Image: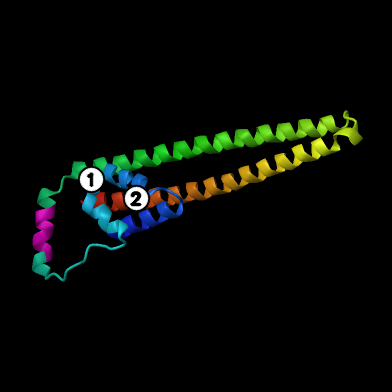
Amino acid sequence: MVENVLLETIKNMRSSGVSDDEIENMLNSMGYSSDQIKLAFSGKVAPVENKTEDKVVEEEKQVSSTTDTKGHADRAELASKMAMNVSEAVSNKVDDATSEVSKLKDEYNSIKDSVDTLAKSEHIVNIDKKTDNLHLKTDDLNSKMEDLDAKVNSLLSIMKKILDSQRDILLKL
């Protein structure tokens, strides 16, 4: 199951525009090995071999005796902190973009108010250019906001899956 979550995480992050290097660094910091990451980037999961019930019981005994519960808790805490950091960074970007939109609206209103005081026949071309430029900037900013919103939703989804998988691992221990 962890392999599928890893593949889904990589897929979602790539679709959000996150580079492979950034994804690899994040997964390394979460404790995934380079081999696991390379395998996941190739789109493959580790093969599951057919095991007898005795083999499964024996492996479970070995895993339970060698598994470091604290290590899993540390990974879960790291994933949680990472999710919080990503959320905070995205929130800051949204706040900055909102502030920029507000400034553009103020500039637009200022231009609109000053139209009445201008000699209309002399300045209509200049006002049209400024208005067109302002509309282009507003459209660009709205596009960026939609992009950012999609990325935030994708990151939140990824972080929820990571936290759920870590919780599942901890509950199994």
Q: Secondary structure at mark 1?
A: helix
Residue type for callout 1: His
Q: Return the residue at label 1.
A: 72
Q: Residue at x 20, y 42 (%)?
A: 71
The one nearer the camera, 24 or 31, is 24
Q: Which residues are magenta?
A: 56-63
Q: Position of residue 92 (x, y in %)?
A: 50, 34
Image coordinates for residue 3, horizontal then vertical, percent: 28, 58
In the picture, the disc for residue 44 is none
> Residue shown at 50%/37% (left/top)?
91
Residue 61 is a magenta residue: yes
Q: Which residue is mark 2?
A: 162
Residues packed near mark 2 inside 10 Å, few (<14), some (14 to 19) or many (20 plus): many
Disc 2 + disc 1, Cβ < 8 Å: no
Q: CA distance from mark 2 to mark 1?
A: 12 Å
Q: Position of residue 46 (x, y in %)?
A: 22, 62
Residue 2 appearing in the image: no
Relative side of 136 to 85, left or right: right
Residue for point 13% across, 54% down = 63
Residue 61 visible within the image? yes
What's the residue type where badge 2 is placed? Ile
Question: Which of pointers 2 and 1 lies earlier in the amino acid sequence?
Answer: 1
Instruction: Work out whether 69 lies above or below 121.
Output: below
Query: Is residue 82 highlighted in magenta?
Result: no
